[in-house]
Image (tube, grey):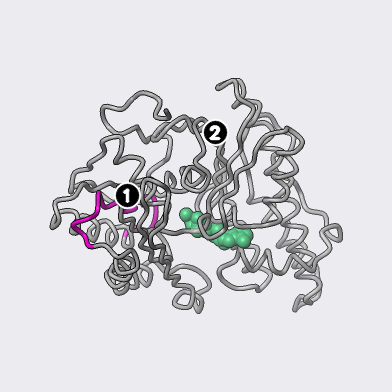
Amino acid sequence: MIVLGIESSCDETAAALVDQDRRLHANLVLSQFEEHRPFGGVVPEIAARSHLEHLDGLIAEAMRQAGIDFSQLSGVAATCGPGLIGGLMVGAVTGKAIAAVHGLPFIAVNHLEGHALTARLTDDLPFPFLLLLVSGGHCQLLAVEGVGQYRRLGGTVDDAIGEAFDKTAKLLGLGYPGGPAVEATAKDGDPARFSLPRPMLGRPGCDFSFSGLKTAVRHIADSLDYPLSDEDKADLAAAFQRAVGEVLVDRCRHALDRFKELTGQDGPLVVAGGVAANQALRQSLEGLAAERSIRLVAPPPKLCTDNAAVIAWAGLERLRLGANDPLDTPARPRWPLDQLTPPAGNLEKTDP
Ligand code: KG4
Ligand code: ZN
């Protein structure tokens, strides 16, 4: 089995080929950072036009690198949501057209399921596992029981975690994309100079909140001399990152207890999504894993941030359970993970 994956839900155009032995035959990502940078964030219309301009060429190059033609594919998987509707439509229509012309199954992949199943691509991880999904638009804890089987344990009540990183970066004048800039700036900072709140820390349950943290960063920045010195920026970024790390660990601790009640298992804990590329946060979670004597699976950063390999993989996991989505499957801007179901006819737990 070999599946072509297409990703175009936000500001990365991506095409990849992945087989059932978890081999990546091609994994191409074209970031649109330069196109959006003058605007300080993603402009949906620019994103959609850029996907349209580049996707065909990128798919052709991925096929060339893999050394196969379309007739050798087992299926075509494209992200159909959640995300920016214009970009989603470009990727979905392209995938459907390739599937229709070559008589292949089409798999409409939920972008979040791509992140959720990454640890099975990278580490061959069996179900169930606890997932901390941290991306630009989401921050959730889920018990992952099978393909299409997600039980939401908690999520953010306001901002997504990536959004908090991006807004903090903007506030500190670090530019776009914000997450990697905050991480790089924090490296030289003293996390103890400024005291920031730890929203939700110690509260029952598994929910998150980031808007108060962002506001606290703004208040501190406003109280300092303008423009902020490099030292101020580094110290604030470090304080922000430490606060986020402590909150994530606290929420995951609660979620691990809940996961144990649900499954009888102590772990493993998987972290995925763009923010999972952050080394400081990964270290905080490593600390928790050591404390609980459980395994932490954190995929390589390149497979945490948006890419099509994880979309191809999620498509392949669905395909081998019999998925073949109709060509009128819509692209959807909103598509919660816990609304997914396993492919029809496969309602059993999906792991051997
Ligand atoms: O998963 P992703 O690539 O796209 C979405 O599905 O949203 O996540 C993008 C988010 C952005 O908010 C970006 O700033 C953040 O992930 N991010 C990071 C890092 N790399 C990307 N946040 C913190 N540290 C990083 N190294
Ligand atoms: Zn993503």
Mark 1 vs ligand 1: CB under 8 Å?
Answer: no
The residue that mark 1 highlights is 332
- Taking 179 as reference, is 191 left or right? right
Instruction: Tell me if residue 269 is in the magenta stretch.
Output: no
Q: Amino acid at mark 2?
A: Phe
**Residue 348 seen:** yes
Magenta residues span: 69-85
Q: Nearer the viewer, residue 163 or 297?
A: 297
- Taking 247 as reference, is 299 left or right? left
The residue that mark 2 highlights is 129
Q: Nearer the viewer, residue 300 or 21?
A: 21
Q: Amino acid at mark 1?
A: Arg
- Taking 78 as reference, is 208 left or right? right
Q: Is residue 186 above or below residue 345?
A: below
- The kind of secondary structure element at disc 1 is loop
> How crowded is the residue under tag 2: few (<14 C-alpha within 10 Å), some, or many (20+)?
many
Looking at the picture, how far across and down is residue 9, in whole percent?
38, 58
